[in-house]
Image (cartoon, rainbow, N blue to C red):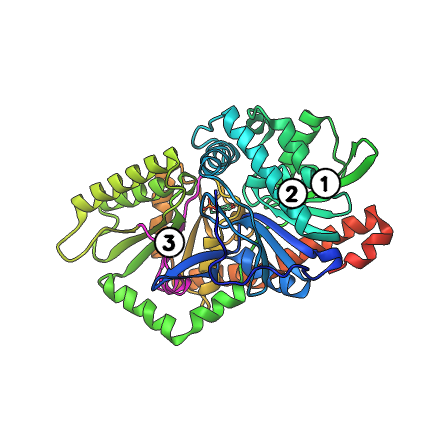
């Protein structure tokens, strides 16, 4: 590995704020909340888009916070540095670790396993060894950064071993874990050769959060079966030598920065851009939209297939209708993603070849990421939003669409297999495997009387505007502080944040 100084920041201060040179609040996630950009040969960092980063920024600013994570490039060691409200502690990954820990165990073993085995998970001992090594490195980095008695919040499936490793290194810490993706049923989780080690890793946390109550129940059943530890009312006692602690497991459905999206959607330039988009699409009567990472869990093929059949049977016509599909490039070296891209692009090419006219396209397929303002303009330009995931922890695109539609117009077609479906009950819920059902729902969405659409959208907006990502993080951190106060009454009083 090379050792590169950080391009635009001075080295981290020798003694960071907090007790004993550490930070009182530490977030740990596979990726740091910043991205490196290079403009005119100048490298700099900018804050990553996304709700988690937005939600945790104020907590970081208030609590002398640090963030531990990978900065996204292999074979590069960066010093700790400060960027806006964050103190950043980069964890290096070698090229081999990117292949084995990130692309391999995280995204070709755990990701498909936790998403209903839509793609077959691969089990390789070399990948598992790398996952263990990298999780240990994250835990060690966190132990260096955290102040005495600090609160640490570990994020997502890439880091499930960190809570236990960290507890061993630093029993003084309060440890939370949030799983952003589904937690699978026992019968599926049980396929994992390292199932006990993963559950033990997670059970190092004082509080484990899941998207849906069903995910928390799946986890509890797995712990009972594979570790022989029963949960009662969401709590279980664990023991390791002299150390004994309580693990709490429950659901905290994540949300978005609803107010910020509503505000963006009200800006005249964004509204103008929405009109421009419709015009550029040939002023159709109905714009259908899909926005996803190009991932096989998202049901992109099912959606495009249904759309193609609606053109085929004459229910929709090119010109009056268009489907815009934004597919953000993702995990592009993982085989199942390469294969999916070929399938999606083959299908789009097939449909467009058959139905395009000289002036209009059937499916406008965009394999890029866009600035968030452009996405909000697209939401505003859309009549029918299609979220057809085969399995999805939450799906924030569904919530973003609702937050953007301040005038109450627009129809959301939403897969039953998303966490969001438990909250957005007035969406048109679909089973994306049922292509005929999906087609009928897409036609119903297109033809929905405006009064009914408004009624549904307003009800969904009440939910989304009243439950934002700040509320989510506050609820989790409040319960974590409580769990800590119950476990260690004297220390707990200082922890309310
Ligand atoms: C999902 C996961 C996140 C992950 C994101 C992007 O939302 O829950 O943990 O960061 O996908 O995937 P990537 O592999 O690019 O980090």
Confirm if mark 3 falls within 8 A of ligand 1. Answer: no
For residue 345, above or below residue 463: above
- Looking at the rendering, the stretch of residues picked out in magenta corresponds to 367-390
Residue 140, disc = 2
Q: Is residue 332 left or right of residue 20?
A: left
If you read the primary sequence from the N terminus, does the residue marked by circle 2 or circle 1 appear first?
2
Q: Is residue 370 magenta?
A: yes
Q: Is residue 119 above or below residue 57?
A: above
When asked about the image quadrant of residue 179, the answer is top right
4 left or right of 472 in image:
left
Q: CA distance from mark 1 to mark 3?
A: 54 Å
Res 184 seen here: no
- Report crowding for label 2: few under 14, some 14 to 19, many 20 or more residues within 10 A (C-alpha): some
Proximity of marks 2 and 1: CB atoms separated by less than 8 Å:
yes
Sequence-wise, the earlier of marks 1 and 3 is 1
Q: What residue lies at 43% left-to-right and 60% top-to-bottom? A: 453
């Amino acid at each position: 590995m090379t050792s590169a100084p950080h391009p635009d920041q001075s080295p981290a201060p020798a003694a960071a704020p907090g007790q004993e040179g550490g930070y009182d609040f530490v977030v740990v996630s596979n990726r740091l909340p910043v991205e490196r950009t290079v403009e005119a040969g100048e490298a700099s960092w900018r804050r990553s888009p996304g709700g988690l980063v937005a939600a945790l920024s104020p907590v970081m600013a208030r609590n002398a916070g640090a963030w531990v994570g990978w900065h996204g490039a292999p074979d590069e060691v960066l010093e700790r540095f400060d960027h806006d409200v964050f103190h950043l502690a980069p964890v290096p990954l070698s090229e081999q670790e990117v292949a084995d820990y990130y692309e391999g165990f995280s995204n070709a073993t755990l990701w498909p396993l936790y998403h209903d085995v839509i793609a077959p998970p691969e089990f390789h001992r070399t990948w598992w060894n790398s996952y263990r090594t990298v999780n240990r490195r994250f835990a060690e980095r966190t132990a260096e950064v955290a102040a005495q008695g600090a609160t640490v919040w570990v994020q997502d499936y890439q880091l499930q071993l960190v809570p236990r490793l960290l507890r061993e290194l630093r029993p003084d810490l309060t440890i939370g874990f949030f799983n952003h993706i589904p937690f699978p049923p026992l019968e599926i989780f049980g396929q994992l050769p390292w199932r006990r080690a993963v559950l033990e890793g997670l059970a190092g946390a004082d509080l484990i959060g899941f998207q849906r109550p069903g995910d928390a129940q799946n986890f509890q059943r797995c712990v009972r079966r594979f570790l022989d530890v029963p949960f009662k009312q969401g709590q279980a006692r664990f023991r390791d030598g002299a150390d004994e602690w309580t693990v709490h497991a429950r659901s905290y459905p994540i949300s978005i920065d609803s107010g910020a999206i509503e505000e963006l959607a009200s800006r005249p330039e964004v509204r103008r851009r929405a009109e421009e988009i419709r015009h550029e699409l040939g002023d159709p009567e109905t714009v259908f939209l899909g926005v996803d990472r190009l991932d096989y869990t998202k049901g992109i093929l099912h959606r495009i297939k249904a759309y193609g059949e609606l053109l085929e049977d004459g229910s929709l016509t090119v010109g009056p209708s268009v489907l815009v599909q934004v597919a953000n490039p993702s995990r592009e070296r993982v085989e199942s993603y390469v294969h999916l891209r070929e399938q999606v692009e083959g299908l789009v090419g097939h449909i467009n070849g058959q139905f395009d006219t000289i002036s209009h396209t059937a499916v406008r397929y965009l394999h890029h990421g866009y600035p968030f303002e452009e996405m909000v303009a697209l939401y505003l330009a859309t009549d029918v939003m299609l979220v057809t995931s085969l399995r999805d922890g939450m799906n924030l695109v569904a919530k973003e669409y609702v937050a953007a539609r301040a005038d109450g117009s627009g129809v959301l077609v939403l897969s039953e297999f998303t966490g969001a479906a438990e909250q957005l009950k007035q969406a048109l819920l679909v089973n994306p495997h049922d292509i005929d059902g999906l087609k009928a729902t897409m036609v119903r969405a297109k033809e929905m009387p405006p009064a009914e659409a408004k009624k549904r959208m307003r009800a969904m907006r009440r939910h989304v505007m009243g439950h934002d990502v700040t509320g989510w993080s506050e609820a989790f951190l409040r319960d974590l502080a409580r769990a800590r106060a119950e476990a260690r009454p004297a220390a707990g009083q200082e922890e309310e944040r």
